[in-house]
Image (cartoon, grey):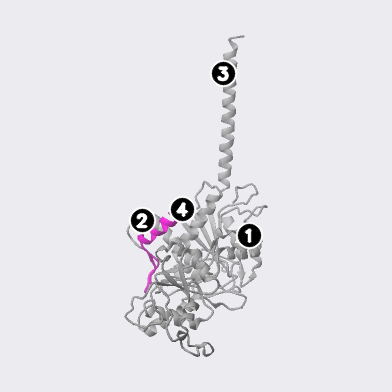
Amino acid sequence: MKGLFPFCRGLLRTRGSIRRLHRAGMCLAADEQQSSFQPSFGLLFDIDGVLVRGKTPIPAAKKAFQKLVNSQGQFLVPVVFVTNAGNCLRQTKADQLSDILGVTISQDQVMMSHSPLRMFRQYHDKCVLVSGQGPVLDIAKYLGFSNPITVDSVRESYPFLDMVDHTRRPNILPSAAVDIPKIDAVILFGEPTRWETNLQIIIDVLLTGGHPAKLHQNDNYPHIPLLACNMDLMWMAEARSPRFGHGIFMVCLENIYKKITGKELKYEALMGKPSEVTYHFAEYLIRTKAAEMQWNKPVQTLYAIGDNLMTDIYGANLYNRHLQERHSRKGSAALVQAGSGARVTTVSQEEEAVWESELSYPSATQCKSVLVCTGIYNPHAEVPADPSQSVTETVYHGHRDFRIDPALVEPGHIVPDVNAAVDLIFQLETFVPTSDKRTL
């Protein structure tokens, strides 16, 4: 019997090892099964014209988002909302979207047109003039600017600068000028309510080197840095035709400056769609959400769903080109160029280095564009059966500093609405939502 004990102990150890191996195998199988549930794509949603028109929800939006969450309301795939709106904080927009879509949206899923300004730290401690409407001072401080000043505050200090509206003209000019700090840069968040006041005072600031009460000097060129968010020429609200966007205000500012000085207005940076930095930031947010989901697979494909050829489609295609060229050159010193023609937008390696130091290198290798027909793009037109059919606008509605390249305004796919877009993407990715996937 004694001789059996070592054998029995060995058998018990063997059986224990088998059980451990079995459990390890089950865990490995579970991990592999879980990994197989993890899609390698993320979704970038425009808002106006895709999910809402003005404050009115588009019916297809709720249907679409019911497919993107599980029974607990948790997202099954990483989702980020990329809007050119810039007149509110991210949390405010997240709350609005939660009410509209019937699912919980966090501010980390919202990309405002001004979000990349967080990376422009060289201006954060300077006195910056901010133009727009809504809580622009709160937005500026949230983004890291310690000394923002509004157009209204400049007007209050120098009321004689604002002379267009007769009813607002000062009856008595101040006996002495009120000193305000030298303005080092101008930031355009979005369209203001009083265009004539903003246009006048911004021009004053640019032509005086940041001292708006002083005499205009045409030799103040190049002018102080100008950073602009949201280049949308028009956007879709409840009206049957598109409404003026911030891009229209920028056109006014550019033409006034050139008419007065004979020189081109220069932008230090352009943010919001279709700029590459906006999509790079959005891709970073997608990666962040995937990390919170504890995914092992990198997100390699982005789908950008929008209604505007010159912002959503152009931007997605431009970023797709950027990703392809960035991966192909592998550290080459060349510039990434968008298209061909008189105007060009380029991303230098220095700019890329700044992005990557802040956001790290993108995992995505492609960005596919999906056009919906519920917004700027004619909602009553018949959806082309062949997406290769040209839908290029005959009049160029993009910003002057972006090249006219027909290839960049050709959507990868055209669908009736956002619900059809989600169905199409699931089909392309062979993704079948199930309730037992790892979620946010």
Task: Write the start and end of the magenta stretch as one range.
Answer: 337-361
Query: Closer to the N terminus: mark 1 or mark 3?
Result: 3
State the separation of the CA atoms marked 1 and 2: 38 Å
How many marks can you see?
A: 4
Are the residues tagged 1 and 2 within 8 Å (C-beta)?
A: no
State the separation of the CA atoms marked 4 and 2: 16 Å
Query: Closer to the N terminus: mark 1 or mark 2?
Result: 1
Q: Residues within 10 Å of mark 2 (few under 14, many from 20)?
A: few
Q: Which mark is residue 353?
A: none
Observer-side mark, 4 or 2, equals 4
Q: Residue furthest front?
A: 175
Q: Secondary structure at mark 4?
A: loop
For this view, does 23 lie left or right of residue 317?
A: right
Residue 184 coordinates in the image, percent (x, y) = 39, 72
Q: Which residue is mark 2?
A: 329
Residue 161 shows in this picture? yes
Q: Residues within 10 Å of mark 1 (few under 14, many from 20)?
A: some
Observer-side mark, 3 or 2, equals 3
Q: Nearer the viewer, residue 420 or 75?
A: 75
Q: Which residue is mark 3?
A: 10
Q: Is residue 408 above or below residue 23?
A: below
Q: Which residue is mark 1?
A: 65
Are the residues tagged 3 and 4 within 8 Å (C-beta)?
A: no
